[in-house]
Amino acid sequence: MKNLMFFLLFAFIVNIGTAQDESSYMMIMVKHKKSFRMARTVQDFQNLANNFERIANAESDQWHPLYYAALCYINMSFVTDQNDQKDAFLDKAQAFIDKALLIYPDESELFVLQALLYQGKIQIDPAGRGMTYSAKADEELKMAKDINPDNPRVYYLLGLNVLHTPESFGGGPAAACPLFETAIEKFKTYLPENVLSPTWGGERNQMFYTKYCGEKE
């Protein structure tokens, strides 16, 4: 009986500790996720990337810290003017995506993130990289869509891909607008799985729709 009571007490203490650890993890992740929305400079994103990397090292079974670390580096590639830095930032992001996919290989958001990285590669050398990386991004987005056809970021990035494809190859604003419009509708009904789920893209998608297609709220 004493052994049973000791076991039950031990299990109770372990469960409390696990719940506290989980709560602490969620709180710090939510804090940094909120900070992400206000990041603007390379240094802002670098500081956040370092924070997410430390969390990822401590929480090796979680994909969200790796996701947001990668997203920080991808954004750094968009805000810097130095092309050599852009590639270096994207290489760092790729390493985090690869690790995240090992943990959660069927997550739609990770394929979307990979597509965003490929679009980041295009901006460095549109003429030399456009065809190759546009096709790669399209493949990733198709996989993301197969996993979750209601993911609005899929349609937003597909719209960007089509927008920057020459009209002679089936691209341009007229072809992209239906995708941006679908994304708008998907963003309206999108329900994040939890507080750590990605929520970016809606404002930018609306911006592109307004610029190339007209007004839609």
Image: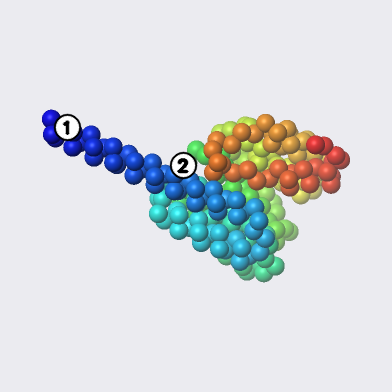
Pick whichever, 170 or 203, lies toward us.
203
Question: Quadrant location of residue 1?
Answer: top left
Pick whichever, 183 or 175, lies toward us.
183
The image position of residue 179, as x and y in percent, is 74, 37
Residue type at mark 2 is: Tyr
Nearest to N terminus: mark 2 or mark 1: 1
Question: Quadrant location of residue 3?
Answer: top left
Q: Write the residue at 20% across / 36% down.
A: 7
The image position of residue 197, as x and y in percent, is 56, 42
Q: Which mark is residue 84?
A: none
Dot 1, crowdedness within 10 Å: few (<14), some or many (≥20)? few
Q: Write the residue at 85% across / 39% down.
A: 215
Q: Is residue 159 visible?
A: yes
The image position of residue 97, as x and y in percent, is 51, 51
Dot 2, crowdedness within 10 Å: few (<14), some or many (≥20)? some
SS under mark 2: loop
Residue type at mark 1 is: Leu
Label 2: which residue? Answer: 104
Label 1: which residue? Answer: 4
